[in-house]
């Protein structure tokens, strides 16, 4: 596959926020390891006229995906919501809190062209940067990328098996040539979620690459 970068390419840096880093409310194991490769990738994209978009989990207090919003339920249990199965999470990335901030270690963030906030609908979770978990409500990201003339999407960040995978699957479904930069991601991996996500990506035609493939 030809991974020469250019003006039709965009790097999506997904949810690199304090609550997903070590010490955060929903820390992804080794989550801080994605920061350096994403910074390196962003510099490479910038030097080849590529683009950078960030995503940010942005929940109101008492969001329906929080275990604390459901009496007798614990984090990582699954319940049925009107839109389907929902994993319940610890309270995380609450609007206006430090945990919701994009880490300052992500030096490339100052050069981002757009920040997509998701999960702000109190009654619907949102893993994907393109569509909420009801699978009907669009964020507008696909339209933004199309209007900018961008055709190839590279996904990196947190977590591989949830927000990264859902974003990549939706990008592919929207007609973008989609890649997951696997070593620039880290997974939660609960109840076999990582293996399922990787299988889903392969089935959908999303391609896997590594940071080194893009840095040359």
Image (spheres, rainbow, N blue to C red):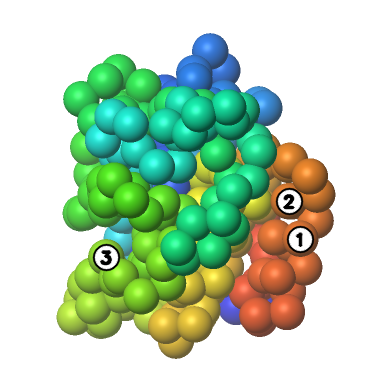
Vertical placement of residue 27 versus 108, above or below: above
Task: Please tell me which residue is depicted at 73% across the width and 42% down the height of the picture.
Answer: 189
Residue lying farthest to the bottom in this orientation: 175
Q: Earlier in the sequence, mark 1 or mark 3?
A: 3
Between the residue at mark 2 and the residue at mark 1, the CA separation in whole angstroms equals: 5 Å
Please tell me which residue lies in front, 105 or 55.
Answer: 55
Residue 69 in which image quadrant: top left
Q: How packed is label 1: few (under 14 Cα within 10 Å), some, or many (20 or more)?
A: few
- The quadrant of the image that shows the N terminus is bottom right
Q: Earlier in the sequence, mark 2 or mark 3?
A: 3
Query: Taking 149 as reference, is 195 left or right?
Result: right
| Secondary structure state at the residue bearing disc 3 | loop
Residue lying farthest to the top in this orientation: 23
x and y percentages locating residue 181 in the rendered image: 60, 55
Vertical placement of residue 121 versus 19, above or below: below
* Residue 26 seen in the figure: yes
x and y percentages locating residue 78 in the rendered image: 64, 46
Between the residue at mark 1 and the residue at mark 3, the CA separation in whole angstroms equals: 25 Å
* Residue 45 seen in the figure: no
| Secondary structure state at the residue bearing disc 2 | helix
Residue indicated by mark 1: 196
Disc ID at residue 139: 3
Between the residue at mark 2 and the residue at mark 3, the CA separation in whole angstroms equals: 24 Å
Q: How packed is label 3: few (under 14 Cα within 10 Å), some, or many (20 or more)?
A: some
x and y percentages locating residue 48 in the rendered image: 36, 62
Query: Taking 20 as reference, is 49 left or right?
Result: left
Q: Are marks 2 and 3 in contact (CB under 8 Å)?
A: no
Disc ID at residue 193: 2
């Amino acid at each position: 596959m030809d991974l020469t970068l250019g003006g039709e390419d965009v790097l999506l840096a997904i949810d690199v926020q304090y609550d997903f880093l070590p010490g955060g409310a929903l820390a992804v194991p080794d989550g801080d390891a994605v920061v350096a490769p994403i910074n390196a990738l962003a510099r490479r994209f910038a030097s080849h006229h590529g683009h950078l978009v960030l995503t940010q989990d942005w929940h109101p207090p008492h969001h329906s995906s929080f275990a604390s919003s459901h009496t007798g339920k614990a984090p990582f249990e699954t319940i049925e919501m009107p839109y389907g199965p929902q994993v319940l999470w610890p309270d995380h990335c609450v609007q206006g809190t430090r945990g919701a901030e994009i880490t300052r270690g992500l030096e490339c963030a100052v050069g981002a062209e757009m920040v997509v906030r998701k999960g702000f609908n109190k009654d619907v979770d949102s893993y994907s940067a393109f569509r909420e978990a009801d699978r009907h409500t669009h964020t507008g990201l696909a339209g933004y990328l199309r209007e900018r003339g961008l055709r190839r999407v590279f996904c990196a960040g947190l977590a591989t098996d949830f927000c990264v995978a859902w974003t990549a699957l939706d990008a592919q479904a929207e007609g973008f040539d989609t890649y997951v930069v696997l070593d620039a991601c880290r997974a939660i991996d609960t109840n076999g979620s990582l293996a399922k996500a990787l299988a889903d990506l392969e089935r959908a035609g999303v391609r896997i690459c590594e940071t080194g493939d893009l840095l040359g």
